[in-house]
Amino acid sequence: MMASATGGTRQFVEDPAELSGGDETFYLEQVTIDDGDDDEYEYEGVELDDDDVADEGEEDLDQALRTLKLKRGMAVDEPPSAPEKPEIQERPEVVDDFIRNFLRKVGMHKTLDSFQREWYALKEDGKLNEEDVGAVPDVYLRNQYLRDEVKVMKEKVEKMEQIANKARATWDKFRKERDFHKMHHKRVVQEKNKVIADLKRIKNHYADFEPALAAMRKKYEAAMKEKMMMKLERDRLKAKVTALETQVMQLESIRPATDEASVAQRPRPRPTGASLPKQPRPNPFFAFSDEPRAVETYALQATAQAHDVGVAAVAHHPTKQIVATASDDCTWRMWTVPGGELVMSGEGHADWLSSVEFHPHGSHLATGSGDCAVKVWDFRTASCSATFSDHTQAVWDIAWHDLGDFLVSASMDHTAKLWDVVAGKCRSTFRGHVDSINSVCFQPFSENLCTGSGDKTVSLWDCRTALCIQTFYGHLNAVSSVAFSARGDRVASTDADGVVKLWDVRKVAEYCQIYAGPHPANHCAFDRSGSILAVASDDGTVKVFNVDLAACATDDGKASAHLNDLRGHDQAVQCVVFEPNSNKYLVTSSSDASYRIWS
């Protein structure tokens, strides 16, 4: 307890502390009593018994409590009654305490120390009166209380906003998952409906086959019955023929000797058709050597739109300035060079054309097609003079023998066939490749031919025996084209990796390798000198190489074998040929439906 008296005012300040004396509990409050205050309080003296009054030095808390009870008229030993609930009255804070609390709250400790020193110095000197100080107006306390409430409410609002944001994020997540599952469900329903429709369509499709299968089954049974009847008829006729032969032998045995002599003198029928020479002819290109032309300066000279779709092959006439083109539109056409005027065209194949070749004498034209047929066209009659259709799959390439009596074709059915144009029949079939034969050519002035296959091999064949005499291995992808040099001592082959290999026929070994990739090399052709090789590439260019330089090129600075890149086609170049007489120019055909002349 603290007590202060200033002027006529007494003030008691007690912390609300709990005082326990005996069996009762008391609370002390702060009360200010003014001497000049006219109120209803009356003070009177109370006489204390000697037994109850103790010396001032011996006064303690218990004594004070007993004295207070006696003043209130309560028995000392009376059991305590239920304590009344105290009422707490808030009093305005004095100014100095308000300032101290404010400075301590904001952390202005130095200012607080200065204030304390100056405050107590003034108070010690008596220059500071309590009346002048007064209490803090209630509005400040109320503002402070409201600020505290606002702060608490802001914290609550922030917490609520965080909770709301989390709830909103969770709701957005659930909404997205709902939309995802809804879209997934719709997609599954659409796929299910599509599958159901496909099943119905397939069922209807197969239901349409049932009558056809039944009809084919009946035809098969009828054919088997006819086969059995034919076997019976064959056996009957065979027995009849045997009997007739026996009768003929008996009749011949009784004929006079003159009849036998006359029969012996009758000439036997001569076999029809052409025959292959037993020995190779002299190659005129060994007698002289042509200098290779300066293909480094070759450039585009003429362009002709030959067909409406891609041109698969082009061939040059052996003696005239005429070229022939074969297209995917199932037709072939002849054009003048370099004028580009149409001379003749032919139709007759049922599918795309893959190859075209002039007869060595220039009187006929041969074409190979995807309809498994090879046709020979006669310029004098302007019609098809022969059709060879023994292949079971598409024909990829054809080549004439230098005598002009034989024609060879390469097919997707893994075989090559030698056709006798005079007799109009197949003379030999070359079997041995295990994949499609993509290219074929004759060795000049001999009876040997070369084939390139999708089984990555190049093979040499003897037309007289239809046997393979040599196979070259080395390609890592399907062989797309093969070509002999004019001397016949070199074979060039290209593959789908853009690799070009030169093979020495005499040494039966690889001569050199040229890389023309990375795009596939579709076709290749030698010039008359045998030193220049043109390669038609799938990237729309024609790459020209000197094979002599390629054979001797090393990594220590030799001249490059690559001479030129002929650019001008818009799509893949499918075929390339040199002008056969003077090498003045070369002709190319492309998938862009045009042929172009370079010189």
Image (cartoon, rainbow, N blue to C red):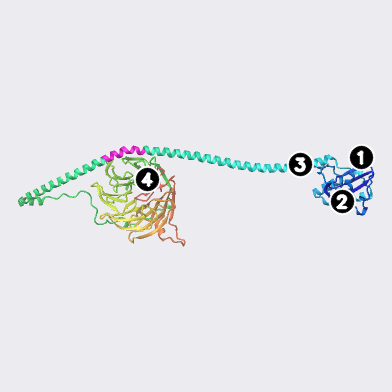
Q: What residue is pinned by disc 4?
A: 312
Kind of element beneath mark 4: strand
Task: Determine whether label 4 and label 3 are within 8 Å by CB.
Answer: no
Which SS class for mark 3?
helix
Q: Nearer the viewer, mark 3 or mark 1?
A: 1
* Amino acid tagged 4: Ala
Calculate the distance from the C-alpha at mark 3 to the C-alpha at mark 1: 39 Å
In three-dimensional space, the C-alpha distance between marks 1 and 4, rounded to whole angstroms, equals: 132 Å
Q: Which residue is mark 1?
A: 41
User: Which three-letter amino acid code belongs to the residue tagged 2?
Assistant: Asp
Span highlighted in magenta in the image: 205-218
Answer left or right for 53 relative to 383: right
Q: Earlier in the sequence, mark 4 or mark 3?
A: 3
Tell me how far mark 2 sits from mark 1, CA to CA. 27 Å
Q: Earlier in the sequence, mark 2 or mark 1?
A: 1
Q: Is residue 225 left or right of residue 9?
A: left
What percent of the width, then of the height, locates residue 152? 74, 43
From the viewer's perspective, is the residue at label 2 or at label 3 nearer?
2
| 176 to the left or right of 505 | right
Residue farthest to the bottom?
556
Asked whether the beta carbons under mark 2 and mark 1 sit within 8 Å of each other, the answer is no
**Is 397 part of what is drawn in magenta?**
no
Residue 171 in the image: x percent, y percent?
A: 60, 41
Closer to the camera: disc 4 or disc 3? 3
Residue 149: assigned label: 3
- Label 2 or label 4, whichever lies nearer to me, is 2
Residue annotated with mark 2: 62
Tag 4 or tag 1, which sits nearer the N-term? 1
Q: Would you say residue 216 sits in the magenta stretch?
A: yes
Q: Nearer the viewer, mark 1 or mark 4?
A: 1
